[in-house]
Amino acid sequence: MIFLLSIDEQIKNTMALVQKFHKKSPESYDELKYFYIEFLKKRHPDISNLFSGNDVEFITDRTLAEPFLNKATKHDNSLIDDLNQGHIIDVGISEVHETQISLMKDALESLKKSYSEFYNSINLVIPSVVFLGSTRARGGSFSGLLGIIWCGIHEGWTIEDYEEFWIHESTHQFLFLDEIVHEHYDYETFANKENWSQSAILNMRRPLDKVFHSIAVAIEIIAYRLHITKTNNNFRTKPHQDVATLFKQVEESLISLDEALSRTPHMLKERGYHLLDLYKKNIKSLKDTWLMNLQDSKEIA
């Protein structure tokens, strides 16, 4: 959530975890990262081999990935798995092609050059990417598996697609981290489908946590296009629609979420409302920038 929350917030959150679980106050970035990795190993002892203290690890070895597969296919640790996400990686899956792995690496290097703040946050919070093919989904993040992104098979994807895949999945991870530290939701209140609202990405009614994430992801993608890549209005990628559609779906999602919260306001905790205010403030700022760019392009034409 780099447009919404800065690299400083990622450092504060990792610091909070380290201080809570290790009773230590790291004196350097390297020490912070080391203790964060140790936290992840203790949190996920059955997949501790997937975490290292170096740069982002790209896991292609099936032997190493097997424990992750077993853990991911058991269940999604969120309260409401509305899309059966705990079973989206097939057993007996195929291998991801080497070309795709190279593109995923190249996309991260591209972000390092063009969007260093986002890259630095990835490098701190997400130590591992696991490559496993699936016929049911193209990749994702699991709320119960902080620090790991799953990358599946993507036919015909370009480096631009993978750059946005990084933005998308990393935003989920940053929110998972923030939720562990601060708590966003009252989980017991939004199991009822009457309290669900419209997702900004899938454009369908989903539980509060999924909708909350979708708005953040869409905002980060819009911000990335407007401020970093500066793509034209019709640009879209395999994972995400054009900016105009994303704006429309975010605004509709926020309206839908406000309606749900008006009925059950305690679904969100204080930190959740703080983030929601950031969503609203920043989508307005982005919309103003976008409209100004459109006006400028018309005047030039």
Image: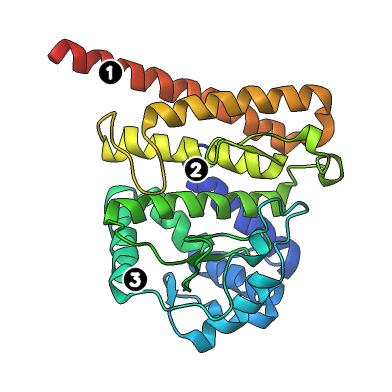
| Residue under the point 40% across and 38% down | 241
Taking the view exactly as shown, the residue that stands out farthest to the front is: 135
Q: Nearer the viewer, residue 254 or 270?
A: 254
Query: Alpha carbon of mark 1 to alpha carbon of mark 3: how far?
Result: 36 Å
Label 1 element class: helix
Q: Residue at label 1?
A: 294
**Rendering coords of residue 300 (x, y %):** 13, 14
Determine contact: label 2, label 3, CB under 8 Å. no
Within 10 Å of disc 2 (Cα), the crowding (few <14, some 14-19, many 20+) is some
Q: Residue at label 3?
A: 101
Query: Alpha carbon of mark 2 to alpha carbon of mark 3: how far?
Result: 28 Å
Taking the view exactly as shown, the residue that stands out farthest to the left is: 301
In this picture, residue 104 sits left or right of residue 191: left
Q: Residue type at mark 3?
A: Ile
Q: Residue at label 2?
A: 6
Label 2 element class: loop
